[in-house]
Amino acid sequence: MHRRTYLGSLASTVGLAGGCLGSGPMDGAETTQTTIAEPTTATATEPPAPTTTDPSTDSPTEPDTETETPDLDPLGIERASLIWGIGGADPILRNAVGSAGAGGTVILGARLLVNVDAAEFRPAVDGRIMNDAGTQIDTVSHELPEAVESPDGAFPYWFQLDTAGYETGTYTCELTATDRLTDGVSATAQFDFDLVEPLDTDDVELRSVDPETVPKGDPFTWELTFRNLADRTSDLQGDLHIEIAGRRRELTDVSWTLPALSTVTHERGEFEFDEPVTLQFDVPSHDIGWQIEVVE
């Protein structure tokens, strides 16, 4: 139904000694001699070897302690969810959200586990999107262009989903991961998410911009810190414009997911300018603007 645009950006040794007694003659008595024969090897001087009895298979006193260890999938998805951003040490875990703005670009994230002894792997993720009636309305697909080092723990993986044409409501995403080097396939991971109305102008404040000044010729990305004043997680959606030396043009459309009643930072870029210049940015739909000075 839709075309996708994506970016990418995740394993353990079981006798007793025999003897003789004799008696001597007593005075005035008839002499009688009793002889105790030497013991034979059949006496208790050599105890018999212990014997063992095989336990009966139906004996309740000998339970079967052998258990089968299930084989792990060569590749696993430990967790999958919608995420508001890709920054931080563990964005799939720390940046998970349950909703985003309908019609914008959202980020799907998954924590991948490599369950085989391999130095490298090249992950790919495929899936489908279903509406609240269980009808498939879209498919998703993304893979890394080259192999990466297998992680010691979880490998964070993410890509974008364009929800243009999606209505507000609840959706289900099913994802399956594949290692292109071994063809190992994970079990399917599933999660639900809501698409809601985008944030209004009064719902969002721009708190800070970093950097405000950069040297010419230095590549840079800028970070925007927003405050979502609304009690719902949704997106700031609009067109980003840039003005340089009096010339203004539309740079791109933006869709920044902001968790409810939270302050978060989104990154953008990278840029590089060889001459000093003042860069004016704004999102007119939300009356948000900022500038960055490129200096000598």
Image (tube, rainbow, N blue to C red):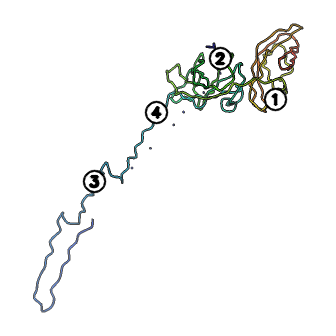
Q: Earlier in the sequence, mark 1 or mark 4?
A: 4
Question: What separation in Å lies between label 1 and label 2 (alpha carbons)?
Answer: 26 Å
Judged by depth in the image, the label closer to the viewer, 1 or 3, is 1
Q: Name the residue type under label 3.
A: Thr
85 vs 30, nearest the viewer: 85
**Vertical placement of residue 250 versus 181, above or below:** above
Judged by depth in the image, the label closer to the viewer, 2 or 3, is 2
Name the spot of residue 72 as percent of width and height, x first. 49, 32
Q: Earlier in the sequence, mark 1 or mark 2?
A: 2
Q: Which of marks 2 and 3 is nearer the N terminus?
A: 2
Q: Which of marks 1 and 3 is nearer the N terminus?
A: 3
Q: In which quarter of the image is residue 205?
A: top right
Label 1, secondary structure: give it: strand
**Vertical placement of residue 156 versus 282, above or below:** below
Q: Which of marks 2 and 4 is nearer the N terminus?
A: 2
Question: What separation in Å lies between label 2 and label 3 (alpha carbons)?
Answer: 67 Å
Name the spot of residue 42 as percent of width and height, x first. 18, 63
Label 4, secondary structure: give it: loop
List the residue tagged with mark 4. 71
Q: Which of marks 4 and 3 is nearer the N terminus?
A: 3
Name the spot of residue 264 as percent of width and height, x first. 77, 29
Q: Residues within 10 Å of mark 1 (few under 14, many from 20)?
A: some
Q: Which mark is residue 53?
A: 3
Question: What separation in Å lies between label 4 and label 3 (alpha carbons)?
Answer: 35 Å
List the residue tagged with mark 1. 227
Question: What separation in Å lies between label 1 and label 4 (alpha carbons)?
Answer: 46 Å
List the residue tagged with mark 2. 6
Q: Residues within 10 Å of mark 2 (few under 14, many from 20)?
A: some
Question: What separation in Å lies between label 1 and label 3 (alpha carbons)?
Answer: 76 Å
Residue 145 appearing in the image: yes
Residue 140 appearing in the image: no
